């Protein structure tokens, strides 16, 4: 399936595409006339379903399909729309437009100065090849995280009860069967080994526990949660952080060798050819842990683009030793300290995980929405209104599922940023669930751009607000 062409509606570098003397009054010189013309051509009322595209730079734009652009061209008495420029969007998702009569201020800048896009310079990505992105470039990865937030929202739409015209997307056949699960772990906080040794070369030596949680993609919540406690390190304390008991987890205490085997079993069993969406917190460190447990991560992909869209045209970054690792975490970096290893942790050949694996780093997705870093996963849980204190890898795995669900059920990424940063946690659920549009009336004219017209999401919205499912355990 070939990747369809889309027509950018307003924003940076649009006028050169649509400018034509036959356009009535050169409507594309005015965003207000542009919006009114598109509404008149495509909608019978004050709302319109349209596609939101996010470029590799992180910039977001409204897009028309060829059929929609053709109808607009006919509406203004032109035989066919202009040929769109080649753009590879990291994400295509639904949003809804509502017509507003507020005037738009004309822009003549040489870049996109809109509030949503001013942080993302298109020139930095004009010639980027998504297959060859340097994974050590934190700025690029954070820009791509914006598209990943929209990817999980689109995945939610696909498996929800809402009836959208999904033929507008070149969807992949991999969507026929998906499993979603999360992986979390707890390392001893007072490990005094050198940084490379405890994060890259042998990150599992002082592992206290690991946790897994699986979820139903159609009703995103934890279905099964498992905790494996490392008997060798179970007596290690975490200072002021106490052990927490997660009541809904199945707990098993194992020795290091058995723990390694169980981790490998989770990643290889019950998968077959099914695609896996793996939720982690800090993908770089997590993948180092999994590699140390003997999991083969070569071929794993960052984000859901290759899962959502046809593989014939979709290109995405790959994890694995053949990919450039992030700064400071090279698997080949040498430490001067000797590599101590428990006799139980004998090396075995890496085990492949079966079908394709798509990794979502919830730490970077958090940054994409809030535009700031979180201290740790407990910090993220608190911001999302999820009970969390102490340490428990199974509870953390469940938290990753809940955060994933909350992000996927919320509005578009820029709306989520506004709502989640403006409102206290307890008001976010009510605000997002009761309002499908975000008012921009207080935004100055110079901040207006066609992105701001897209202010209503079509998917179910809401946040988990359950009672605490764990309690602190003062025992070691």
Image (cartoon, rainbow, N blue to C red):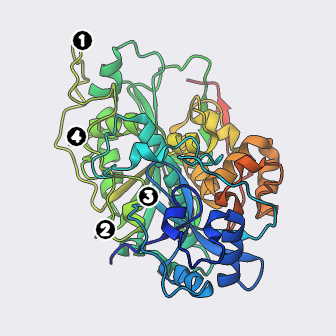
Residue corresponding to mark 3: 90
Quadrant in the picture for the C terminus: top right
Q: Residues within 10 Å of mark 3 (few under 14, many from 20)?
A: many
Residue corresponding to mark 1: 337
Q: CA distance from mark 1 to mark 3?
A: 42 Å
Q: Secondary structure at mark 1?
A: loop
Residue corresponding to mark 2: 313
Which disc is residue 321 wearing? Answer: 4
Q: Residues within 10 Å of mark 4 (few under 14, many from 20)?
A: some
Question: Which badge, 1 or 4, comes first in the chain's sequence?
Answer: 4
Q: CA distance from mark 1 to mark 4?
A: 22 Å
Residue depth check, mark 1 versus mark 3: number of the one nearer the observer: 3
Q: CA distance from mark 2 to mark 1?
A: 46 Å
Measured from the top left, where is residue 247 in percent x and y?
62, 46
Question: Which badge, 2 or 4, comes first in the chain's sequence?
Answer: 2
Q: Are marks 2 and 4 in contact (CB under 8 Å)?
A: no
Question: Which badge, 2 or 3, comes first in the chain's sequence?
Answer: 3
> Residue at (34%, 45%) from the top-left corner?
263
Q: Nearer the viewer, residue 430 or 354?
A: 430
> Residue at (38%, 64%) from the top-left corner?
86
Question: Which badge, 2 or 1, comes first in the chain's sequence?
Answer: 2
**Residue furthest out toward the front:** 21
């Amino acid at each position: 399936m070939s990747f369809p062409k889309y027509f950018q509606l307003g924003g940076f570098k649009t006028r050169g595409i649509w400018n034509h003397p036959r356009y009535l009054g050169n409507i594309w010189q005015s965003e207000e006339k542009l919006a009114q013309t598109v509404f008149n051509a495509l909608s019978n009322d004050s709302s319109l379903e349209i596609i939101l595209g996010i470029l590799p730079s992180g910039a977001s734009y409204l897009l028309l399909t060829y059929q929609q652009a053709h109808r607009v061209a006919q509406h203004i008495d032109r035989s066919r729309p202009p040929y769109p420029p080649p753009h590879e969007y990291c994400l295509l998702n639904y949003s809804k437009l509502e017509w507003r009569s507020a005037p738009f201020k004309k822009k003549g800048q040489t870049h996109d100065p809109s509030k949503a896009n001013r942080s993302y310079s298109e020139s930095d990505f004009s010639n980027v090849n998504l297959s060859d992105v340097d994974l050590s470039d934190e700025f690029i990865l954070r820009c791509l995280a914006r598209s990943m937030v929209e990817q999980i929202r689109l995945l939610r739409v696909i498996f929800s009860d809402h009836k959208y015209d999904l033929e507008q997307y070149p969807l992949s056949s991999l969507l026929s069967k998906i499993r979603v699960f999360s992986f979390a772990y707890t390392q001893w906080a007072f490990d005094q080994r050198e940084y490379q040794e405890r994060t890259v070369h042998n990150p599992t030596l002082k592992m206290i526990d690991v946790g897994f949680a699986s979820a139903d993609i159609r009703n995103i919540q934890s279905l099964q949660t498992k905790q494996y406690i490392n008997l060798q390190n179970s007596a290690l304390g975490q200072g002021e952080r106490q052990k927490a008991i997660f009541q809904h987890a199945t707990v098993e205490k194992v020795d290091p060798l058995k723990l390694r085997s169980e981790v490998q079993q989770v990643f290889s069993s019950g998968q077959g050819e099914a695609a896996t969406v793996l939720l982690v917190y800090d993908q770089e460190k997590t993948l180092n842990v999994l590699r140390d447990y003997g999991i083969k991560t070569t071929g794993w992909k960052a984000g859901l683009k290759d899962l959502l869209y046809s593989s014939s045209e979709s290109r995405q970054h790959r994890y694995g030793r053949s990919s450039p690792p992030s700064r400071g975490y090279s698997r080949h970096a040498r430490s001067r300290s000797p590599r101590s290893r428990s006799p139980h942790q004998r090396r075995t050949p890496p085990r492949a995980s079966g079908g394709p694996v798509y990794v979502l780093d919830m730490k970077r997705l958090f940054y994409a929405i809030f535009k700031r870093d979180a201290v740790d996963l407990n910090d993220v849980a608190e911001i999302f209104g999820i009970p969390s204190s102490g340490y428990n890898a199974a509870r953390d795995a469940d938290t990753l599922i809940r955060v994933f669900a909350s992000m996927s059920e919320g509005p578009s990424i820029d709306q989520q940023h506004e709502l989640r940063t403006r409102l206290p946690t307890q008001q976010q659920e009510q605000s997002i669930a009761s309002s499908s549009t975000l008012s921009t009336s207080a935004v100055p004219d110079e901040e207006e751009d066609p992105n701001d017209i897209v202010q209503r999401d079509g998917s179910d919205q809401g946040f988990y607000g359950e009672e605490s499912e764990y309690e602190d355990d003062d025992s070691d």
